[in-house]
Amino acid sequence: MVYGKRLDDLDVLGRSRLLRGLGVRELGAFLDLLDQVALPHGTSVIREGDAGEYMYFVLEGKARLCRGPMELRSIGPGDHFGELAMLDERPRPVTVEADTTMRLARLSRSRYRALATSHPRLALHFTQALAAALGDEVIAATDSVGLLVHQRSAPRRLQVRVRRGADELIVATGTVVGSLLPREHDGAPVVGAASNKRPVSLESAIVADCQLEPLSLASPNGREIYSRSAGLVLLEAARRVAPALDVRLAGTLENGLVVEVVGDVDVVRVGQAILGAMRRLIVEDAPLREEIWSIDEARAELGERRAADAAALLANRRESTVALATCGETLALGMGPLLPRAGYLGTVEIEPHARGLLLRLRDLDRYMPAASGARMDPAAAEAMAPRHGSEMASAARRWLAGLGVTSVGTFDEQCVRGRVPELIRVAEGFHEKWIGRIADAISSRADTVRIITVAGPSSSGKTTFIKRLVVQLLVDGRRPLALSLDDYYVDRERTVRDESGEYDFEALEAIDLSLLRDHVLRLLAGEAVTTARYDFVRGKSDRAGGASLAMRDGDVLLLEGIHGLNPALLDGVVSPDRVFRIFVQPSNTLAFDRLGALAPEDVRLIRRIVRDRHQREYSAADTIARWPSVRRGELVHIYPFLPHADAVFDSSLVYELSVLKTYAERYLLEVPASHPSFTTAHRLRRLIDQFVAIHPDHVPPTSLIREFIGGSGFEY
C-alpha cells in the first residue's frame, strides 16, 4: 500500500549513511523523489534472484536480510537495501523479509538517473556515498574471508595447467571444472569429475595443476554423486511438506534409495506429497551447494536443527572445518560431491517400502547390467523382497538403540566411554542367537528338509556363517555334509562368456549342472559318492577328485555357492519343500546422518580388501579394479532370487569397521595416486575416517570378522 510522506521522515532519512550531511532542503528534495509503501509482517519485500527496479529506505519497522537459508543481518529505521538496482536490472542477491509491520521509502532507477539533471549536487553526494558504502562492504567481506581462511587459501598463481585426456590446457586459476568437460562421456551425462583421481563437483574451482576426468552416470562414482544429490533434494522436499516428520535415508540401491519414515503416518499420502515437492524442486532447478563450516559452528547449527547424529559425529573430528551439503534450508554432512542443481535429476518416482518409502531414480535404469536380454531392475527387486528390511536387521536396530547406538557418531561416543567389550559381546551374541534360530527352523522341518543352500554376495561372511551353522545343527542332532559349488565349475574353455566377451564365471551355465545333480541325487539315495574338485590354477575340473561322501538318515546336504537361491540349480532333483535356502549379507549399517550411511556393498568391499591384502597378498588396487565385475554378478545371479530365501542372515557387526580400519587404512594408502582405483580408495578412506579404531585383539576367535582379518578358531 502506498502512503503519503510525514515530516519526521526527514529525521529518519538523515540517519542514513547515504544521506548523512545533507541539509533539510536537500533532504526534502530527495524525499520528494521517493514513494512510500506499508507492508505487513511476513512480507517478502524483495526476493533473491528477482530482477530489481527499486532501492528502499526503512522508515519504520524491522526486517531480515537472507541469502539462501542463511540470515545475514537485521535492519531497521535509517537502514537501506536494494541499492544495486540503481545500477542495472541484475538479479537481487538477497531476500528481505519483514519481521514487523514496515513503512518504507523507495527510489526507482529512473528517478535516480533523473536526479543528475534536476539536482546535480545532491546526485553527486548520493552517488559518492553509495560508492563508499559498496566499497566498505567489499572490504568487510574480504577481511571476513581472510579471517575465516587464515589468509592461507588464496590462490598463489594466476594460471594453472589442466591435463584432460591427451590435451593440456592453460586456464585461469578459479576456472570452474564443468566448463572444461563435455556434457556426455561414454554415452552418459557427465555429473561430476575426478581431479587428480579425487571426485569433485562440476562447480569446483581449479586452483592447482591437475588431471581432469569426467564422471558420468556410466560409472559407479558418477551414479553415487547422482544418488547422493537425489537424497538431499528428497530431504528438502520432505522438509517443505512435513517439517515435523523425521525422514532419513536408510539404504542405497543401484537405481534407487530406501527412505525411512519415523512415526505412525500414512506413508502413501506422505510419499506422494514428498514426490510432488521433489518434482517442483527439480523444475525450479534448486541449487545444491557444499559449504565449509567451522566445526563449532556446524555442531551448534546441527544441534538446533535436531540433527543429533550429525552433531555427535563431529564431536571427535580432528579437523577445524567440515563440509556441509545444502539444498534450500536442508543441511547435511557433506560426504562427497553433489550435482550443481536439482534440475540435473530426471524422472523420479516414490512408492511404499517396508522401511517407509522407496525412491526410484529412473535415469539410472539404463545403466543397470543386463542378463538374458533383460536389464536388471534392483529397485523393483527391492520392492518385492527388501534387502534392507529383514526381520533380523530390524531386531538389530532395536538392540543397538537400547545401547544408545543410532549412528556412527553415537557409536564412537560409546567406544570413547569404554563400552567396546560390551558392544562386541552383545553383537556376537546376537549373531549366535540368530544362527541358532535358523538351525532350529531347519530342524523343525526334519521330516522334509534334506538340502540346505547358502548364498550371498561376495565377502558376506558365508564361510564362517556355515561353520557356525554346522555347530548349531549338530547341537540339534543334525549332521550336515558340505558340498561347494566352486568344485563343480566346467573346464575354463567351456565357460560361457558375457556380453563383453569375457568368461562369465558367475553364470549358472558355468556350473556342471548335470554332474552336480547326479551327485546330489545319488547322495540323497544313500549312495557313497566321490565328489568333484576344481583346479583353479589350471582351470580344469576333476570330476572324481574330491572327498567321498555318504548320507545317513537324518543327515542334511549343505550346498554353498553363488547360485544357492536359484531354483534352477536343483531343478528336477528334489521338490522345493525339501530345500531350505539361506541368504547371507551385511545389510544393517550405521548412518552418518539423515543423508548418508555406510552402504552394505562398501562394507563388503572393505572386508574383501583387507582379506585379499592381509591373507592373499592381493593389492587393494587390484581388488577395487575387480569389484565392478563382482557387483554385476551379484545383481544378475543373486539378488533376483532373494524372494526364494527361507531365512535371511544379516552378517553385519556394529563394530567391524572400527576393526577393519586398522588394516584398511594402510592398504588403501598403498593405492598409487595415478591408479584408476585411487578414486574409490580415496572415498573409502573418507568413510573409515569416521570410525574410532578398535584393536583386533578384542575380536573373539569365532567371530565372522576373523574370516577377513585372520586368527579364526575355525579351519577354512
Image: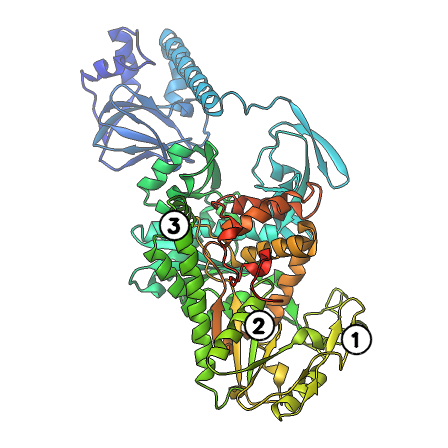
Please say if the residues under marks 2 and 1 sit with CB atoms less than 8 Å apart. Answer: no
Residue at 50% across / 64% down in the picture?
Answer: 651
Say whether residue 13 is visible. yes
Q: Quadrant of residue 608?
A: bottom right
Q: Tell me the crowding category of disc 2: few under 14, some 14 to 19, or many 20 or more residues within 10 angstroms, Cα based.
A: many
In the image: residue 43, left or right of residue 482: left
The amino acid at mark 1 is Arg
Residue 655 badge? none
Q: Distance between the residues labelled 3 and 1?
A: 54 Å
88 and 188: which is toward the camera: 188
Please say if the residues under marks 3 and 1 sit with CB atoms less than 8 Å apart. Answer: no
Q: Quadrant of residue 136?
A: top left
The image shows residue 458, relative to residue 542, as above or below, that is above
Tell me the SS state at disc 3. Answer: loop
The amino acid at mark 2 is Ala
In the image: residue 491, left or right of residue 63: right
Q: In which quarter of the image is the N terminus?
A: top left
The image shows residue 157, relative to residue 673, as above or below, that is above
Say whether residue 329 is visible. no
Residue 244's x, y, as percent? Answer: 29, 51
Tell me the SS state at disc 2. Answer: strand
Q: In which quarter of the image is residue 4?
A: top left
- Judge depth for marks 2 and 1 and give the one in front: 2
- Judge depth for marks 3 and 1 and give the one in front: 3
Q: Tell me the crowding category of disc 1: few under 14, some 14 to 19, or many 20 or more residues within 10 angstroms, Cα based.
A: few
Q: Tell me the crowding category of disc 3: few under 14, some 14 to 19, or many 20 or more residues within 10 angstroms, Cα based.
A: some
Residue 419 badge? 3
Residue 633's x, y, as percent? Answer: 64, 66
Residue at 68% across / 50% down in the picture?
Answer: 621
89 and 612: which is toward the camera: 612
Q: Name the residue under label 1.
A: 494
Q: Mark 2 points at which residue?
A: 455
